[in-house]
Image (cartoon, rainbow, N blue to C red):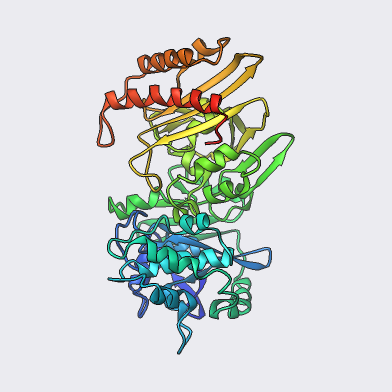
Amino acid sequence: MNSIKFYFDNKLQEIDFSTISPTTTVLEFLRSYPGRWGTKEGCAEGDCGSCTVVIGQIVDGHLEYKAVNSCMVFLPSIHGKFLITVEDLNQGDNLHPIQQVFINNFASQCGFCTPGFEMSLLALYKENPNPSDEEITEAVEGNLCRCTGYRPIRDAAASLRSVISRDNITEKEPVVIKALSSIERTDYLDLQYEQQHYLIPFALDKALELTDQFPEAVLVNGATDVALRHNKQKEKIGLIIDLSFVEELRQLEIKNDYLIIGAGVTIQRLKNNIKDTLPPLHEYLKNFAAKQIRNRATIGGNIMTASPIGDLIPPLITMGAQVIVAGKKDYTYTVEDFITGYRQTRLEKGQILKQIIIPLHEDWTFRFYKVSKRTTLDISTVSLSAGIVVSGQKIKDVRLTFGGMAAMVKRATQAEDFLRGKQITEENFIQAGQLATNQFKPISDARSSAPARSILAKNLIIKFYTDLTQNSEK
């Protein structure tokens, strides 16, 4: 089967990949589709939000809506889904409530960014008709406006509370669900165009079979990293296996004091489900990229980058997380042991990262810090993930994991060894910070100089001490 189907423009669309590349992005598709040019290309890397669209997916019999950057979504990954663009807000003679509040609050000037803002807010109000100020800010933090200013946009968004109960999109939901449910089910999709091959398995067994058959394939899930190779490097990726439809990789549950996370769980879904279980990690994930990216980026994908500044790797190492790798047999590694070097892991050809397991131990206190040039939608310059166990007045155990200080995420083992058995005092943490500074030899790059990184590392350890002694929740 060399085609996909999805609901768009009031009908079930079928795209035959004998005439179009499977690494065509949703944005590229829209820019070539007659009358659907409201979705703009700005940065082509998920930074500006002008390409934001909403994807609807059937979950437990109803549609769930997520705002995503269409420039970073390969067209095959919307198979069986509902694609919504700004043109779908059209309600005939009356403006959609989102459009009307933008006019009422003077929330648009040049208008280039406006469709993206409106689609972000559409997804928000489909998810929650009465969002908090914080949720409104989160919804649009990935949308860049250069001329209007954010106050009128925020005011427009706030004025929508409890206004949108039903709209034209709600009215068509039964038709959309019926159409999407009619799509025939197969074991996998095999999309081929010229020298490109794009495979979509629907079950883990099939995914493992395909990775064993095509060990050279690029594995994607959210594809927020791989899509940049297409957009920025103009790379023609020859063989892709898309794991985003594998249900077994989307498991998320607490079992026997462990949080079990499928490698395909998105960052946003994890954030939304750990507010009470792991509140420090919940707060930390608020500054992971922006919501449109978090709606696509996955836990497994972030680990597999093995980036020295990957946002999730330091917390996972500090929390003692493990990964389960599926193949001809399953293997279990700690995250610390799984990553072997700069962008290198123990994953071998024919294997798939299946699960991440985080132990939930009440005796550990965690704090996660990220220093970057802007609060959201930025990668870290230096990060520290810190955990501590205190017995009586002394430190029983401690873990200090740094990103941005070496070629891979590393623990400050000398500082840890020094602190164990010591009292929680400012002097001890200052000395620990100096030991961490001595252990690492960071590089200078566009984000920071090496000396500045060393100072940041020391200060973050002191910040950890301050938070512990002030009982801060930050």
| Residue 23 makes an appearance in the image | yes
Image coords of residue 340 (percent x, y): 45, 26
Residue at horizontal 46%, vertical 56%? 137
| Residue sticking out furthest to the bottom | 93
Camera-side residue of 314 and 327:
314
Camera-side residue of 202 and 262:
262
Image quadrant in which you'd find residue 59: bottom right
Residue at horizontal 68%, vertical 63%? 60
> Considering only vertical position in the picture, is 2 above or below 199?
below
Camera-side residue of 56 and 117:
117
Image quadrant in which you'd find residue 422: top right
Camera-side residue of 44 and 422:
422
Q: Looking at the image, how many numbered discs can be counted on the residues?
A: 0
| Residue sticking out furthest to the front | 470
Image coords of residue 428 (percent x, y): 48, 12
> Considering only vertical position in the picture, is 339 above or below 2?
above
| Residue 409 makes an appearance in the image | no
Image coords of residue 75 (percent x, y): 43, 63
User: Left of 269 or right of it: where is 43?
Assistant: left
Image coords of residue 341 (percent x, y): 41, 27
